[in-house]
Amino acid sequence: MKSKPMKSSGSLKLLIVPTKLITLFGAVVPGLGCYACIAYTYVFQFYRVHNFISPDCPNVTISFPPISYSIGVWEPQRFLWLFVMFAHFPARLFYPLVNFFLSVSFLSNRFARKPKE
């Protein structure tokens, strides 16, 4: 995907990033990161999955450990998950900012019109 050339706004140069790219980065990257952490656990740390026992039921073995263990407790998955969260955070800020600016723009246009006589 080619990036568009930088536009000039006075003395400030702007980088135009496609909205689809920001949307995909904010929505898809956390899911991919979670699946990568789980896959890493099953491929490289299968002994943890195989020997996982729930503290509430000590005599029952579980073939699927809780996701929170895979992404939050065990290393290096925890670091991968934190990296993904910090990397996609700016894209997540995009949604409320755009919503705020669109609503301010809409409301200012709506109430700034002169009434018809």
Image: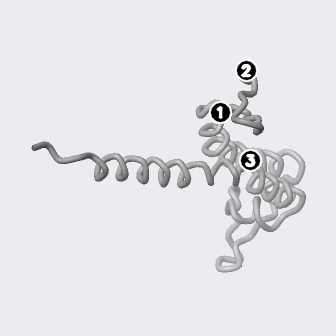
The colour mode here is one colour
Mark 2 vs mark 3, CA separation in Å: 22 Å
Q: Position of residue 80 (x, y in %)?
A: 83, 53
Say which amino acid is labelled 3. Answer: Gly
**Under tag 1, what secondary structure?**
helix
| Mark 3 secondary-structure assignment | helix
What's the mark number on residue 21? 1
Residue identified by numbered label 3: 33
User: Mark 2 against mark 3, which lies toward the viewer?
Assistant: 2
**Quadrant where the image shows the N terminus:** top right
Quadrant including the C terminus: top left
Task: Using a 10 Å C-alpha cutoff, classify the residue at mark 3 as few (fewer than 14 neighbours), some (14 to 19) or many (20 or more).
Answer: some
Occupied quadrant, residue 9: top right
Tell me the CA gap for discs 3 and 1: 17 Å
Question: As shown in the figure, which amino acid type bears the numbered disc 1?
Answer: Leu
Q: Are the residues flagged by discs 3 and 1 in contact, CB closer than 8 Å?
A: no
Is residue 113 found left or right of 88 in the rendered image? left
The answer to which image quadrant residue 5 occupies is top right
The alpha-carbon separation of the residues under discs 1 and 2 comes to 9 Å
Q: Residues within 10 Å of mark 2 (few under 14, many from 20)?
A: few
Q: Position of residue 88 (x, y in %)?
A: 71, 49
Direction front: furthest residue: 117
What mark, if any, has residue 1 been given in the picture?
2
Q: Among all residues in the image, which is located at the extreme left?
A: 117
Instruction: Answer with mark 2 or mark 3, whichever residue precedes in sequence.
Output: 2
Give the quarter of the image for residue 69: bottom right
Which residue is drawn at the image coordinates 62% and 54% (left, top)?
93
Residue type, numbered disc 2? Met
